[in-house]
Image (spheres, coloured by chain):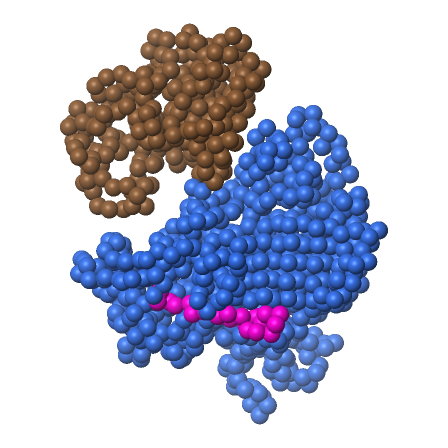
Chain colours: A blue, B brown
Amino acid sequence: MTDLSNAPGSPIGQALKRREDRRFLTGTGQYTDDVVLHGQTYGVFVRSPHAHARIVSIDTAQAKAAAGVVDVITGADLAEAKVGGLPCGWLIHSKDGSPMKEPPHPVLAQGKVRYVGDTVALVVAETLLQAKDAAELVEVDYDVLPAVVDTAGAASAQTLVHDDAPNNVCYDWSHGDQAAVDAAFAKAAHVTRLEFVNNRLIPNAMEPRAANAMYTKHDDSYTLYVANQNPHVERLLMCAFVLGLPESKVRVIAPDVGGGFGSKIFLYPEETALVWASRRVGRPIKWTAERSESFLADAHGRDHVTTAEMALDADGHFLALRVNTVANLGAYLSTFASAVPTILYGTLLAGQYRTPAIHVEVKGVFTNTAPIDAYRGAGRPEASYVIERMAEQCARELDIDPAEIRRRNFIQEFPYATPVGLTYDSGGYVASLDRAQQLADVAAFPARKEEAARRGMLRGLGYSCYIEACGIAPSSIAGALGARAGLFEAGEVRVHPTGTVTVFTGAHSHGQGHETTFAQVVAGKLGLPVENVEIVHGDTGRIPFGMGTYGSRSLAVGGTAIVMAVDKIIAKGKKIAAHLLEASDSDIEFENGEFRVAGTDRKLPFAQVSLAAYVPHNYPHDKLEPGLNENAFYDPSNFTYPAGTHICEVEIDPQTGQTRIVQFVAVDDFGNIVNPMIVEGQVHGGVAQGLGQAMLEGCRYDPESGQLLTGSMMDYTLPRADDLPRFVVDTTVTPCTHNPLGVKGCGEAGAIGSPSAFINAMTDALGVRDVPMPATAERVWRLANGIA
Amino acid sequence: MYGFEYQRPSSVADAVRATGADARYLAGGQSLVQSMKLRLASASTLVDLASISGLRGVSREGSALKIGAMTRHSEVARSPEVRAAIPALAELAAGIGDPMVRNQGTIGGSLANADPAADYPAAALGLGASIETDRRTIAADDFFVDLFTTALEPGELIVAVRFPLVKRAAYVKLRQPASRFALVGVFVSQGDQGVRVAVTGARSHAFRVREMEQALERDFSPKAIEGVKVDPTGCNSDLHGSAEYRAAMIGVLAGRAVAKAREQ
């Protein structure tokens, strides 16, 4: 493992300001919507106003005749052209061994619409306004059908979302040792049982989804600009499964992307339709979602209904955990939808604890709502929520301090193989809990609670000792679990003759600051000024085949690929230097940007070696190719396991139910840290999103009609700065043992750990078993006043 | 947004003349333009009031405060006259929306729009204001008729709002967490015309709670209205608060508003 603190003056570990922020803050970022192509046209989608309806007829005549209209495309056009449906990237098997139900996910509706916002037609016009006007002229005759909306009731609904998915069940999955769990429950001294809902969320990246597709006739190729987190995956899925195009003819560019939180991982209908239509129209077509469309048609997150039971001995040791979850998948299977409530959820249910037996059953159901897929944390927030709500409730029922019950159950020896299939390589759970308790001044909490009570306020304190599995993943494990894609990452390091460096990474930055962090890593390893290193990402025409960014994987997996390529550069550089210094390869050391003959003062700076590689007059041509350009593909041997403790303190006004978060402490173990400022920012953002889920956000559909009730910022409550306290953030460090940087990933931790800490604080303050998320003022008021 | 004609008259008379079927006055545009952008509203003509002199500004007229219809919320919030005469009104204006809304939105626009969750209707009713139009004066008590509906006739234009000075007043609201509009807001005042308790956010339009007013006439203290329950029947019910919750909050907020007014 690299010692990150070795070189004095190394940028690794320093809180460098983000270089990309200059363009973002000065308005010179180049997002998909900023791209205007020669002959540009504009696309607008006609969307279903109904949650569930049969399409009787579509009349496009009036729209086609409207001013400026170039074309109107419906599902019939795509069917005639034999365009396929959108694929799901992860095959889950039910507990009886049968494969999940994969009903077709048409690009434009075929015969039926299945959620409000479902894509029905694409109108292409000279201007955006003309396209919008014409879209209103597309006449669709619907035969409205009853809608399936409720998650818990979907499997018993009379109506079927898909004819070929009986009982609206996609799969009935289970994981873990049921017999061992049953046996443990039979002899348990105590059983704690909780039922709760993990509320449905709408991602709301700052930049809405957008795409601009162009067909080039002279070489029969396509270029797609798209707000996306993984351009190669987008291209692979679109070419291989839907449009039948050779990847060599398609270039996907995800330029500056303004946030994704998972919602831009997936292959969506919109960009697929645009690519196909761009050839038919012969001109580039641009579509940028309006915020209202984002609410309707971005993949949503979470939406679990869960019953959990914990068996304990008399001393509060966890003996077994039994979890039963119904997970809403929405109307169609989005790209990774099937894996989120199964593989990314069930395998995490050990948490930080030695619970010896765990069994989980998950029923994935179809409903007439927008597709649900990965959203910041993706399965792991749901798992963490189950475990940490249970840990706190167990402590209360056994009258054990909630921190103490966690200490009694912490895993303390590593590596540790959990009963749900993961092997944690490293961790220090006691250390982060200790530090968090100290920062939260837990000892003085009773005094604060008393002082609040004198003001008529209810105070509560809650813990969350979360863990997550990041990196996603070793491809072999993911493949065995049903992944239909590899999950490695690629990096290329191109040293230029004068010693500056361009790095091409398969990871994608859409807010994470990779251009800074990755440059710090490469500059640190090569002993170069950070300014001499450029990072290129997000363009299949430039970067090696990569898997993109999600699952807090970029530094651990993408960074490692880059480090491996840098190591190859150094190894080759040593050979060149050995030749120039007339020494043996094995005598050359590389340190602080210099190649040196060990134990002598004979040395060459990096730039002299790179120049020799490209001006190879004096060069070992018999042994070595010219040039200094290396790439590497890295497939990790394990997930990484960031973990930590969050402590939340709330104060409730029982007269109104209004809640103030008075303190939030997050102590996280992300392994080694390359840029502490960026890491802190990630924690802040993640915690804000997690607290948003727990206190404010909640996607709601009308239970009868399936209309989206929270379809705008006027009704969907994203957290604002004044909803949140000043976060107290710190880290503890146990390096990851299986990647050279010793890093674990930090992007999702905040969203994973914080909801349960908040709700545990709320239930503590109110003295109740459950406060449903989001803890709206009225819900809290009812609980505080015992009003049903 | 659909296309529309745009006019910018320089006098009230011209503005009124410019309106016809399907024309709309444009004041600060913070509600109208947003709904037009979403294609939820449209107008054949927008008659922009921004260039009409004399519609904007605050003046003290005897025992009343006169605020021009085109006065921005931020101007009311900052106005030394308002802050000295009716501080609760300045505070209310300072709490409307966000800075952009306050810098563009106007008092006349807000009253004419009569959003059930807007703040100004509570102040107009709670202070017993008079709404002066191009053709008459309408008492606030007669002004708010229904959801987004006022006593204004087609084409009638608010030119100013006259607020009588009071001995003390306060406004307290709970915000709807997403929109930050008033989920429930209660404006309480005590002055020569007695005690007024006006509520916004809870029903289709702002209204007074007479039973509370009577109790407070006898004893202007939070205790006096502790026993007064507001009937949830007719109260708004939505994702952010049931009728039962809103009705209960009227009592809580009225008590807090009285306590706050008593500090003056």
Residue A429 versus residue A151: which sits nearer the camera?
A151
Count of numbered labels shown in the rendering: 0
Q: Is residue A96 magenta?
A: yes
* x then y, percent, for residue B204: 38, 30
Q: Residue sitting at 23 percent across and 25 percent down?
A: B153
* x then y, percent, for residue B173: 49, 27
Q: Is residue B23 left or right of residue A655?
A: left
Q: Is residue A409 left or right of residue A647?
A: right
Residue A597 quadrant = bottom right
Residue A632 quadrant = bottom right
Q: Residue sitting at 70 percent across and 59 percent down?
A: A322
- Residue extending farthest to the right is A315
Q: Is residue A680 left or right of residue A442?
A: left
Residue A775 quadrant = top right
- Can residue B193 be seen from the camera position used here? yes
Up the image or down, A526 lies above or below A663; here it is below
Residue A440 versus residue B214: which sits nearer the camera?
B214
- Can residue A740 be seen from the camera position used here? no
The kind of secondary structure the magenta stretch mainly shows is: loop
Q: Is residue A105 magenta?
A: yes
* x then y, percent, for residue A412: 80, 60
Which segment did they paint magenta?
Answer: A89-110
Q: Residue sitting at 62 percent across and 54 percent down?
A: A306
